[in-house]
C-alpha cells in the first residue's frame, strides 16, 4: 500500500477462470427443456480423408443427445495433430477451448450460460485501510460475465451497492462498466 496526498492506495489483481463447462441453451426436440450439459466428449466421423467432428451434449431433463458441429468435411491433413489427438482422447481442455469460441456457438445457434461455472481469484485487500483501490481483472478464458456481478463478487458487496458506487462515481474505468464483459480490464474504486 502507498500513501500520498490522495490517501492510501492499494493495487490488486483478479483472475476469472472457469470451474466447469457452461450450460448450453438450446431447445430440446423431445421435451420442453432448453438446457444441455456437455462432459467434453467428441464424436469423430471419417469419410475417406475428410473428417466431421462434433461436441456431444445431453439434455439435462430427458438425456437427449445433441451434436454441436466443430468441424465439417475437413481434410485430415488440415487438422493440427495435437487437436486431432484431443478429439480422439475426449480432452476436456480442448472442449473448454472450443466452447469459449463464439464461432462455435454461432454456427450451432446456441447460447452459453456461465452461471455458476466460473470463479474469481482475488488478493485480499482491507478496504477501510485503503482509500483508493486499483483493480486489474484478467480472464483466463473468454467467459462473458456481467461486470456488476464480477465487481460485487470481488469486493464482497451486493450488486445494488455496486450500482450505487457506480452512480456516485466511486467506481470508474476507461471502459463502460455495464453489460457483459469477457476481456481484461481495470477499474478504480474510491472507498471514500
Image: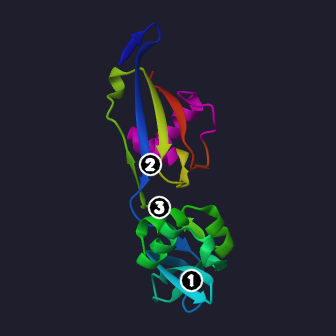
Alpha-carbon span between mark 2 and mark 3: 13 Å
Q: Which residues are magenta?
A: 148-177
Q: Tell me the residue that label 3 is attached to.
A: 115
Q: Residue at x 46, y 89 (%)?
A: 62
Which callout, 1 or 3, points at the residue further toward the start of the chain? 1
Q: Disc 2, disc 3: CB below 8 Å?
A: no
Task: Locate residue 22, reporting x and y percent.
Answer: 48, 66
Q: Secondary structure at mark 2?
A: strand
Q: Secondary structure at mark 1?
A: strand
Q: Residue at x 54, y 54 (%)?
A: 142
Q: Determine the image quadrant of residue 76.
A: bottom right
Q: Residue at x 53, y 34 (%)?
A: 186
Split into 4 quadrants, where in the image is the C terminus?
Answer: top left
Q: Tell me the residue that label 2 is attached to.
A: 16
Q: Secondary structure at mark 3?
A: loop
Q: Tell me the residue that label 1 is attached to.
A: 67
- In this view, the residue in front, 130 or 15, is 15
Residue 67, placed above or below residue 138: below
What kind of secondary structure does the magenta stretch mostly adopt? helix
Alpha-carbon span between mark 1 and mark 3: 22 Å
Q: Residue at x 48, y 34 (%)?
A: 136
Task: Locate residue 45, reporting x and y percent.
Answer: 56, 87
Amino acid at each position: 500500500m502507498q500513501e500520498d496526498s490522495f490517501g492510501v492506495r492499494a493495487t490488486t489483481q483478479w483472475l476469472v477462470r472457469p470451474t466447469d463447462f457452461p450450460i448450453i441453451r438450446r431447445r430440446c426436440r423431445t421435451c420442453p427443456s432448453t438446457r444441455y450439459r456437455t462432459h467434453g466428449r467428441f464424436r469423430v466421423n471419417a469419410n475417406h480423408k475428410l473428417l466431421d467432428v462434433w461436441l456431444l451434449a445431453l439434455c439435462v431433463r430427458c438425456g437427449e443427445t445433441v451434436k454441436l458441429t466443430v468441424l465439417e468435411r475437413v481434410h485430415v491433413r488440415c487438422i493440427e495433430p495435437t487437436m486431432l489427438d484431443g478429439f480422439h482422447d475426449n480432452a476436456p481442455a480442448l472442449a473448454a477451448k472450443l466452447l469459449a469460441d463464439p464461432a462455435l456457438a454461432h454456427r450451432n445457434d446456441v447460447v452459453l450460460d456461465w452461471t455458476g461455472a466460473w470463479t474469481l481469484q482475488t488478493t485480499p485487500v482491507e478496504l477501510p485501510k485503503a482509500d483508493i483501490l486499483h483493480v486489474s481483472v484478467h480472464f483466463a478464458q473468454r467467459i462473458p460475465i456481467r461486470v456488476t456481478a464480477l465487481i460485487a463478487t470481488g469486493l464482497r458487496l451486493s450488486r445494488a451497492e455496486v450500482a450505487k458506487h457506480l452512480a456516485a462515481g466511486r467506481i470508474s474505468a476507461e471502459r463502460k462498466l455495464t453489460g457483459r464483459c469477457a476481456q481484461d480490464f481495470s477499474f478504480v474504486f474510491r472507498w471514500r
